[in-house]
Amino acid sequence: MAGRIQLQQTEVWMVRLNAPEGRQAQILRMLDMDERQRAARFLFPSVAGEFIQAHAALRLLLARQVGQRPKELCIKADAQGKPFLPGEPELSFNLSHTQGCAGIVLAIGHPVGVDIEKLHALSDLEGLIERVCTTGERQELLRIPHEKREGFFFQLWTRKEALLKALGSGLRFDPRRVEVGIAEERQVDLSGTPGGSRAWYVLSLTAESGYAAAAAYGGARGEVVVHPTLDLRDLIEAG
């Protein structure tokens, strides 16, 4: 039986993965067996801990929307690897996390994707631009002063990755076929691709200093609510 869906639009959260050490056992109990097994396969405890906290944050936010406890949620993945909740066919959601911060997007009635990246030095920025950008994007980036270009590249990349996740294509889809630009919300032209029958939109998100983030959604253009950044410890306290 479906739970109580509270969403009215596309909603996005940034979550600092800063739960105190003493809450780790409580957080782990929120995850299902598959998530625990995936966490156990990571070689480094810090990476496993981030995975556990990010998936707990997703479960806490989903639980608010469907009226269940976080550990009761049965999260599955479809053939393209996109997550879903059986019994909640209208609810779409996506998760991204990196080095202490997670991005989560939830929506009703249309596919969504999110990506967050920690900014860092790139040894071959120009080569990356050639490999993943369209001609228009390359021209746009090359007009930006060199000292600022790297940050704008991360912004462009998160937009592209969020869209590919919303499509369910991931990196199996040549990123040079998708032009997303580097700023503002915009509609993306996917004519001639498997997702071309639907309108798609991508927008950059305000993230913590040192991060770039973006979200994407398919369907009619609508309001996207970006919530203030949360601390995971506060999300846990709020239940």
Image (cartoon, rainbow, N blue to C red):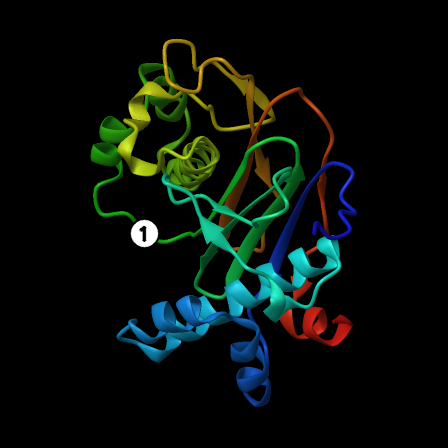
* Mark 1, residue position: 121
Q: Quadrant of the C terminus?
A: bottom right
Picture coordinates of residue 92, whole percent (x, y): 59, 41
Q: Secondary structure at mark 1?
A: loop
Residue 202 appears in which quarter of the rendering?
top right
Eyeballing the image, is 48 above or below 211? Answer: below
Crowding at dot 1, Cα within 10 Å, few <14 / some 14-19 / many 20+, comes out as few
Q: Nearer the viewer, residue 228 or 26?
A: 26
Q: Residue at x 42, y 9 (%)?
A: 191
Q: Residue at x 44, y 36 (%)?
A: 152
Q: What is the tally of numbered marks visible in this picture?
A: 1
Picture coordinates of residue 47, whole percent (x, y): 37, 71
Q: Say which amino acid is labelled 1.
A: Ala
Eyeballing the image, is 168 above or below 103? Answer: above
Answer with left or right where residue 34 lies relative to residue 27.
left
Q: Residue at x 45, y 39 (%)?
A: 158
Q: Nearer the viewer, residue 147 or 46?
A: 46
